[in-house]
């Protein structure tokens, strides 16, 4: 039986259940998006000839669509996920500016601090496509931002920050977040630090260069791989090796950005979290081949900020944000992920446990692509931070992670009456929803040895205070030349301890 969402303390929530997006939306956190708002144009048509002036295709435009982009797309995602959103920025009084403002207002976003100026050009990015392929992008933006507009935005920042639970800085380098505005935000947050009324809001910086924002001591910064490489002044390798390379420079990135944590986004390779305590966390993307998808990074940082401002733990927030990004990469154009879409995506992981025979066939396809299989097993009854850390470590031992769950009857034999807390379908759904997990299966034998002999994973991983000699599965792994890996043991985290705390009423939400 799954726990009631109303009885769950979000600060203790680790599993990505399908009810979680709705619970986060119910919190309705107030979030300010400060930054470079844009209008994205998507024009599509057919190509049947080349122009006579040059060997260039002629696109007969048949459809035109405009949607908020840049910081405005981040705001749209936040609103779609249930936040109370305000936008602060500068646009022109041109048609693009009017269109952008109207769309934001229609989405229920507060535009009180979205300033317009007659000498400002609203940044637009028009993508022209045919047959699902983007052929050309036309960017139009102001060469400089009017000084009086910058001064007006800087003066309004203090009141814009008031009563916000989170502030998102979306700096695309167009000049809107120049020194006057940056100083205004520094002063506004410094006032909270000096004890002025209100709690200092969560500060998330999504910037082409986070270093100028270091004096604000942001809680989170979210550079992509290219931006991270520029900060480190090196070229990052391609593929999964990038995450390991980035992790080796964690101290440099944390110091350069002044952040409490750095989340490096790696496109198709997911993300890596870097923290001062040395603990890293990975997410793995489920990429799509959609050639016209755009704005997944905006969706990711929006969902991450919403989850953190509502009290979800950082690692769980990252997994949720990755799921939201996975939703939009399957949609064409500049898209948003709504609460309903995210819930449906997570619910789709229910009943995803594969029968061993079908799983064996799937793994052979991965081996044909020279991918290494990692298998681990356990009850995974009440998911906690020890589980998620351990599964992240297991994923990094290979390419494909398989989690074998003990059946309900098997859990009862191991743990006694009253267990499992969650039936195997629920356990499979929440484990499968973790971005680091590729496949889930269920076994009912006393040990996982028969399943190991059938699937023959290159690596068998186990977490806890074991040695390979203590594991009943080790002989089965060694029979075909596999490797046994023992991962970190988190001494202060166990399902039994969590269950006992719940039964004792510790950490539970008090309701009237």
Image (tube, grey):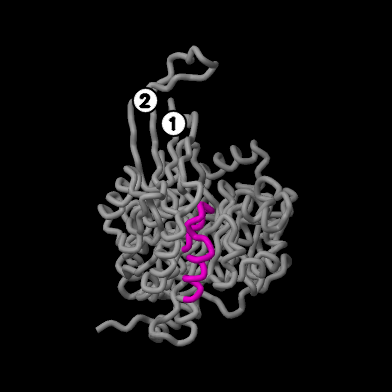
Q: Residues within 10 Å of mark 1 (few under 14, many from 20)?
A: many
Local SS, label 1: strand
**Which quarter shows the C terminus?**
bottom left
Furthest toward the top, the residue is 52
Q: Residue at x 43, y 26 (%)?
A: 130
Q: Nearer the viewer, residue 92 or 448?
A: 92
Q: Nearer the viewer, residue 50 or 430?
A: 50
Q: Is residue 431 above or below residue 140?
A: below
Span colored in magenta:
169-187
Q: Is residue 140 left or right of residue 374?
A: left
Circle 2 sits on which residue? 61
Q: Is residue 323 left or right of residue 468?
A: left
Identify the image quadrant of residue 280. Answer: bottom right
- Indicate which disc residue 128 carries: 1
Taking the magenta stretch, the answer to whether it contains residue 176 is yes
- What percent of the width, then of the height, locates residue 77? 38, 55
- What percent of the width, then of the height, locates residue 167? 43, 68
Q: Is any part of residue 310 visible from this angle?
A: no
Q: Residue at x 46, y 72 (%)?
A: 202
Q: Nearer the viewer, residue 54 or 255?
A: 54
Taking the magenta stretch, the answer to whether it contains residue 252 is no
- Indicate which disc residue 353 carries: none
**Which quarter shows the N terminus?**
bottom left
Q: Residue at x 46, y 44 (%)?
A: 141
Q: Is residue 183 above or below residue 62?
A: below
Asked if labels 1 and 2 touch by Cβ distance under 8 angstroms, the answer is yes
């Amino acid at each position: 039986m799954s726990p009631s969402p109303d009885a769950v303390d979000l600060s203790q929530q680790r599993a990505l259940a399908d009810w979680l997006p709705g619970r986060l939306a119910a919190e309705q956190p107030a979030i300010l998006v400060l930054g470079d708002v844009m209008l994205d144009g998507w024009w599509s048509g057919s190509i049947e000839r080349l122009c006579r002036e040059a060997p260039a295709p002629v696109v007969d435009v048949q459809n035109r669509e405009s949607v908020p982009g840049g910081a405005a797309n981040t705001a749209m995602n936040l609103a779609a996920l249930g936040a109370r959103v305000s936008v602060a920025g500068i646009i022109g009084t041109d048609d693009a500016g009017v269109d952008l403002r109207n769309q934001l207002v229609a989405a229920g976003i507060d535009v009180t601090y979205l300033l317009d100026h007659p000498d400002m050009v609203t940044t637009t990015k028009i993508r022209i496509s045919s047959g699902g392929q983007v052929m050309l992008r036309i960017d139009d933006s102001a060469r400089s931002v009017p000084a009086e507009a910058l001064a007006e935005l800087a003066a309004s920042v203090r009141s814009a920050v008031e009563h916000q639970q989170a502030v998102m800085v979306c700096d695309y380098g167009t000049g809107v977040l120049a020194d006057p505005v940056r100083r205004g935000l520094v002063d506004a947050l410094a006032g909270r630090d000096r004890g002025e009324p209100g709690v200092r809001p969560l500060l998330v910086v999504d910037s082409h260069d986070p270093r100028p924002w270091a004096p604000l001591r942001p809680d989170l910064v979210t550079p992509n791989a290219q931006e991270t490489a520029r900060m480190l002044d090196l070229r990052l390798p391609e593929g999964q090796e990038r995450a390991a390379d980035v992790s080796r420079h964690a101290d440099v990135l944390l110091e350069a950005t002044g952040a409490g944590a750095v989340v490096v986004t790696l496109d198709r390779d997911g993300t890596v979290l870097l923290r001062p305590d040395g603990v890293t966390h990975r997410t793995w993307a489920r990429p799509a081949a959609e050639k016209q998808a755009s704005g997944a990074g905006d969706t990711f940082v929006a969902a991450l900020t919403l989850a953190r401002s509502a009290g979800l733990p950082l690692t769980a927030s990252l997994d949720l944000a990755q799921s939201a990004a996975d939703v939009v990469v399957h949609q064409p154009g500049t898209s948003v992920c709504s609460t309903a879409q995210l819930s449906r995506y997570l619910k789709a992981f229910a009943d995803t446990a594969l029968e061993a025979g079908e799983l064996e066939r799937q793994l052979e396809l991965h081996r044909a692509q020279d991918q290494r299989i990692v298998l681990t097993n356990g009850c995974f009854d009440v998911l906690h931070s020890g589980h998620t850390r351990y599964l992240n470590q297991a994923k990094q031992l290979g390419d494909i992670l398989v989690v074998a769950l003990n059946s309900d009857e098997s859990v009862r034999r191991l743990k006694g009456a009253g267990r499992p807390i969650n039936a195997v379908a629920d356990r499979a759904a929440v484990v499968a929803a973790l971005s680091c997990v590729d496949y889930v299966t269920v076994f009912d034998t006393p040990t996982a040895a028969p399943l190991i002999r059938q699937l023959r994973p290159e690596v068998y991983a186990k977490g806890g205070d074991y040695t390979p000699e203590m594991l009943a599965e080790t002989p089965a792994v060694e029979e075909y030349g596999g490797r046994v890996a023992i991962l970190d043991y988190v001494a202060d985290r166990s399902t039994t301890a969590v269950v006992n705390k719940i039964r004792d009423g510790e950490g539970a939400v008090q309701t009237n």
